[in-house]
Image (spheres, grey):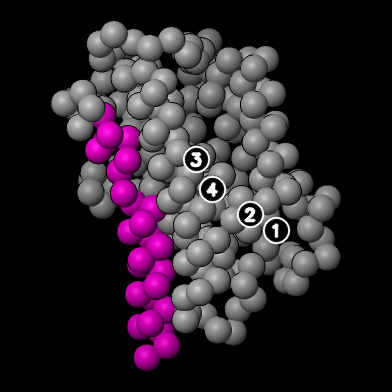
Amino acid sequence: MNFASNAVWVLIAYLIGSIPTGYLVTKRARGIDIREHGSGNVGATNVLRVAGKGWASLVLTLDFLKGWVVTAILAPTAPAFPDLSVVLRQLLFGFAAIAGHTWTPWLGLKGGKGIAASAGALLGIFPFASILATLIWALVLTIKRYVSLASIVAAGSFPILLLFFYRSIESFWTVFAISAALAGLLIYNHRANIERLRRGEELPVTFGKNKKPSSSP
């Protein structure tokens, strides 16, 4: 009975994360399938290039909230995994939500890269480290103008931040291993971007609003 109940709660976290906000917003706002424009990704960066900063900001906020709701509200209150600490339960639920965002069943298991959803999920668990990682992301973006590079650096820095600031928490090394696995997943999701960065073909971000959908990669 506990196994079935636990599985249901993890599935709920996964389904919350799986809501394809970028696809739904651009479909409603522009009448387009975001997967057929720009890079083809459903995340906020591609929405920025295709639909403009207003819609991209909305997608970014919604993706962030998906992760935050799961770890800050659902995980601490759900009657699941009673033997786990709250932090481990939050990480488990957060991982499920990020997996749902990355492999959404509504789009053939092809979703976003998980940075905004991860930021929201981790803010609900480790607010101080999450704010520092966000500042690192913003700094790299400001200097280099590549969202992908900023996201990769921020993801990689997060386990290190935990090592510096959260070593005293219960079950730290388990928490650290899960956070390192999550960082690895986020970096893996950017493998195409890494290859474009190596070739000098990655597009820098611009904050102007596009007048019509772009079909460039």
- State how far apart marks 3 and 4 are (Cα): 6 Å
56 vs 38, left or right, is right
* CB-based contact (under 8 Å), mark 1 and mark 2: yes
Disc on the earlier residue, 1 or 3: 3
* CB-based contact (under 8 Å), mark 4 and mark 1: no
Rendered view: 9 above or below 149: below
Residue type at mark 4: give it: Gly
Nearer to me, 202 or 55: 55
Residue labelled with disc 2: 179
Q: Seen from this angle, which residue lies furthest bottom?
A: 1
Q: Position of residue 52 (x, y in %)?
A: 36, 18
Q: Which mark is residue 120?
A: 4
| Mark 4 or 2, closer to the camera | 4
* CB-based contact (under 8 Å), mark 3 and mark 4: yes
Q: Is residue 25 magenta?
A: yes
Which residue is rendered at x = 55% and y = 38% of the image?
A: 187
Which residue is rendered at x = 35% and y = 66% of the image?
A: 12
- State how far apart marks 4 and 1 are (Cα): 18 Å
- State how far apart marks 1 and 3 are (Cα): 20 Å
Q: Position of residue 184 (x, y in %)?
A: 58, 45
Residue labelled with disc 1: 176
Residue type at mark 1: give it: Phe
Judged from the image, the secondary structure of the residue bearing numbered disc 4 is: helix
31 vs 76, left or right, is left
Residue type at mark 3: give it: Ala
| Mark 4 or 1, closer to the camera | 4
Nearer to me, 152 or 117: 117
Magenta residues?
Answer: 1-26
The 10 Å Cα crowd at callout 1, few under 14, some 14 to 19, many 20 or more, is some
